[in-house]
Image: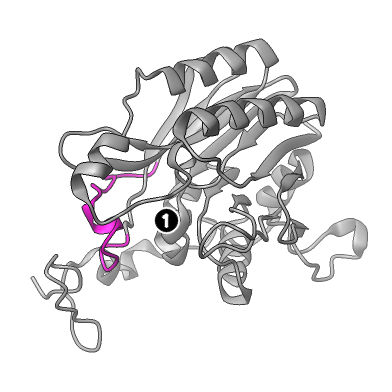
Amino acid sequence: MKNFNVALLQLLPAGSQEENLRKGLEYCKKAKQAGADIALFPEMWNIGYRLTPNREETERNAIGLDSDYIARFRALAKEQNMAVAVTFLEKRGSQPRNSVMVIGRSGNTVLQYAKVHTCVFDPTERQLGAGDDFYVANLDTENGIVKIGAMICYDREFPESARILMLGGAEVILVPNACPMEINRLSQLRARSFENMVGIATANYPHGQPDCNGHSSAFDGIAYRQSDGGGSRDTLIIEAGEAEGIYMASFPMDELRDYRKREAHGNAYRRPRAYHALVSEEKAEPFIRDDGHGQGRKE
C-alpha cells in the first residue's frame, strides 16, 4: 500500500447540531474529491465542542449511536466509498462521553472510542464519563488495510495512550482535538510518533473557535529515511495554519511498514518487567491534587 490519505477537517462549527451535520457532510464530500481515504473531524463536532457547566444542557446535547447524525454519516461513507472519523458528545446515562466513531466505506462501524483522559480539572469536561480502553481496528481502504487507533486531545499528553495503541498494532493514530496547538503540544505529537514508529493525524478547530488556533498536523513516524542516507529527518507531513480548510496528510504506508520492521523503537527492545510503577495507582507529592474528583489522590 503506497499511501493512506487522511483529510484533516479544520472547520469552524455552525450555530446548531443540524447545521454542523450539514457542514460536516459537505466537507466530507470535498475531502473525497481531494482524494481522501478517511475524513477526520476535530473533537466533539456535533456541538462544536461547546460545553457548558450545566449538566442538564450537556445531557440534552448528547446523541445516541442510533441517532440521525450517525446514520447520515454512515450513508455518506457508503455513498462516497470513503471512511469517516466522526466525533460527538455520546449519550450514555447521566454521564455523556467525548467520543469518536470510525465509519468504514461500507457504512459499518470500524472503531468506537471514548476519551480516556477526560479533563476532570475543567468544570465543563468533569461532567463527562471516561472511556476505559484504547482500541485498534483494521480499516479497509480502496488501496488496502490500515491498522488504526484513536486518542482524543488530552490523551495526547500521556505517553501511555499512544504506546498502548502501538502495542495493539496501530500503524496510524487519529487524534480529534480542540485546544491551542502550540510548540509543546506539537512536540508531544512528534514524540508519540517517533517513539512508537506510528503515523499520527490530528484535526483541530481553526482560529475563530474559542481557545483554538488551527495547526492541525500529521507526523509519519519515519525518523530515519534510507533514501536520504539514513540521517535524521523531520517526521512532519503537514502543519496547517490558522485558517479553516481541508488539509491532506498522506502517509507512505509501505515505507512506514518497512521502517517498523528494522528500526529500534516501538516494541523491539522494551523491558516490561521493569515498568511496574506504570500500572501503580499510588501517587505522591508533588502530584497530589484535591479537586473533588479523586484525580491525583493517593489511594
Q: Is residue 282 left or right of residue 142?
A: left
Q: Is residue 169 visible?
A: no
Q: What x and y, as percent, mark residue 56? A: 19, 43
* Residue at the extreme front of the image, as rendered: 15
**What is the number of callouts on the image?**
1
Q: Is residue 155 above or below residue 100?
A: below
Q: Is residue 297 left or right of residue 276?
A: left
Secondary structure type for disc 1: helix
| Front residue of this view, candidates 195 and 90 | 90
Coloring basis for residues? one colour
Q: What x and y, as percent, mark residue 66? A: 35, 17
* Residue at the extreme bottom of the image, as rendered: 286
| Front residue of this view, candidates 175 and 93 | 93
Q: Which residue is mark 1?
A: 161
Magenta highlight range: 119-134
From the image, which quarter does the C terminus lie in?
A: bottom left
Q: Is residue 130 left or right of residue 250?
A: left
Q: What x and y, as percent, mark residue 202? A: 60, 52
Q: Is residue 131 magenta?
A: yes
| Front residue of this view, candidates 146 and 114 | 114
Q: Is residue 102 left or right of residue 186?
A: left
Residue at x-position 68% and y-position 31%: 27
Q: Is residue 95 magenta?
A: no
Kind of residue at badge 1: Ser
Q: Is residue 248 above or below residue 33?
A: below
Q: Is residue 236 visible?
A: yes
Residue at x-position 19% and y-position 79%: 289
* Residue at the extreme right of the image, as rendered: 228
Quarter-of-image position of residue 138: top right
Residue at x-position 66% and y-position 55%: 216
Q: What x and y, as percent, mark residue 115? A: 36, 48
